[in-house]
Image: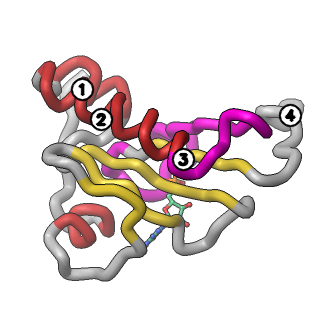
Amino acid sequence: MAYTYDPENIFAKILRGEIPNKTVLETDHSLAFHDIYPQAPTHVLIIPKGPYVTYDHFAAEAADEEIIDYTRTIAKVCEMMEVAEGGFRMISNAGHAGVQEVPHLHVHILAGRPLGRMLQPAG
Ligand code: 5GP
């Protein structure tokens, strides 16, 4: 699969400082910030700084140091948000069927309330 990255997506604009964000953590290769429309008391988005569309794109093509940085950033955010004890959900939507709104890889960390089952039954 060849991925085409749109540099005008909203998270690219956040990374360029063109749109403000409520930063949780910034590292050399990653940025974590609060979702603008939180779906739970804790709702943090974690993105790599590189131009990756989806998690599989990133996992296939990112440099090892980017992958390590991103993975460790997810761990640090979980620790900072204290989500492990009560439980949390980590989601990364991809493409049309995944209803991905922003075409720049992001992981959602959701916590702070019962989150229900992962998926609705197919209708
Ligand atoms: P997706 O559906 O692509 O997995 O999720 C995109 C997420 O980005 C949504 O939860 C949406 O609320 C969030 N979002 C969209 N625009 C902005 C923005 O400008 N700032 C922040 N912080 N979050 C945004």
Q: Callout 1: helix, strand or loop?
A: helix
Residue identifier under label 3:
108
- The response on whether ligand 1 sits within 8 Å of label 3 is yes
Asked if the residue at tag 4 contacts the one at tag 1, i.e. Cβ–Cβ closer than 8 Å, the answer is no
Residue identifier under label 2:
70
Q: Is residue 67 magenta?
A: no
Mark 2 belongs to which amino acid? Answer: Tyr
- 90 left or right of 29 in image: right
Instruction: Please identify the quarter of the rendering in which residue 3 is found.
Output: top left
Mark 1 belongs to which amino acid? Answer: Ile
- How far apart in space, not on screen, are marks 2 and 1 (Cα)? 5 Å
Mark before the other along the chain sequence, 3 or 2: 2
Residue identifier under label 4:
117
**Point 35% across, 43% down: residue:** 105
> Which contiguous range is marked in magenta?
80-105
Tell me the crowding category of disc 3: few under 14, some 14 to 19, or many 20 or more residues within 10 angstroms, Cα based.
many
- 95 left or right of 112 in image: left
- How far apart in space, not on screen, are marks 3 and 2 (Cα)? 13 Å
- How far apart in space, not on screen, are marks 1 and 4 (Cα)? 29 Å
Q: Nearer the viewer, residue 2 or 71?
A: 71
**Point 88% across, 46% down: residue:** 114
Q: Position of residue 112 (x, y in %)?
A: 77, 53
Q: Nearer the viewer, residue 123 or 33?
A: 33
Residue identifier under label 1:
67
Asked if the residue at tag 1 contacts the one at tag 2, i.e. Cβ–Cβ closer than 8 Å, the answer is yes
Mark 3 belongs to which amino acid? Answer: His
| Above or below for 54 versus 110 | above
